[in-house]
Image: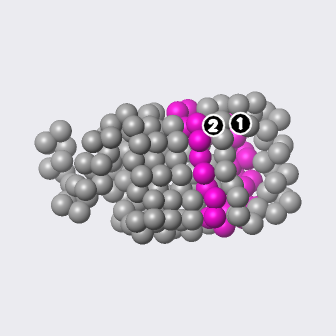
Amino acid sequence: MAQEAEDYSSEEEDIYFQFVKNEGGSVDLSHDRLGVEGAKQVAKALLTTKIQDLDFSFNDIQLLGALAIVKALETNQSLQTLYLEGNNIGSQGAEAIAKALATNQSLHVLSLKDNNIGSQGAAAIAKALKANQSLQSLILDNNNIGSEGAVAIAKSLEKNQKLH
């Protein structure tokens, strides 16, 4: 563990050690306004630790932060719950997360509430739900998905029987 920590700056150590300290459990970094750089640190920690639940809501990670988290989700197989509420990821961030959902089979709960993903982001997530069979709960409140996005999600539920 000491060698792994050497790869982190002192600012990153706080996040990394929260992950190590809570190995197999939960980490709550919500409302910390960590931004894109914080998202990159979290993504790095997700690659080397095995936490099960992460609340990274309201950190203003935007698209670039979402892309960092997505890279970690592509290989992380321990994370079961991920809250990314209120992070301004937009439709492109939702599209990136959708790509990770197509391959990630450990995530059970995903909340993208308050991210303004729009109908385009909802459609990308809907497409991913056809392949993903691990997700059991998806929270998309307040995202301006409109009727087009809602229909896309509804149609995906015909193929995905796990989501409720």
Residue 133 appearing in the image: yes
Q: Residue at x 55, y 38 (%)?
A: 107
Mark 2, secondary structure of its residue: loop
- Disc 1 packing (10 Å; few <14; some 14–19; many ≥20): some
- Please check the rendered image and state whether residue 118 is part of the magenta-colored stretch, yes or no: yes
- In this view of the protein, which residue sits in the foreground, 121 or 139? 139
- Please check the rendered image and state whether residue 160 is part of the magenta-colored stretch, yes or no: no
Q: Quadrant of residue 34?
A: bottom left
Q: Position of residue 49 (x, y in %)?
A: 32, 39
Q: Are marks 1 and 2 in contact (CB under 8 Å)?
A: yes
Who comes first in sequence, dot 1 or dot 2? 2
154 lies above or below 142: above
- In this view of the protein, which residue sits in the foreground, 128 or 37? 37
Q: CA distance from mark 1 to mark 2?
A: 6 Å
Which residue is the site of mark 2? 135
Part of the protein shown in magenta: 102-131
27 lies above or below 89: above
Image quarter in which the N terminus is found: top left
Residue 63 appearing in the image: no
Q: Quadrant of residue 115?
A: bottom right
37 lies above or below 101: below
Which residue is the site of mark 1? 163
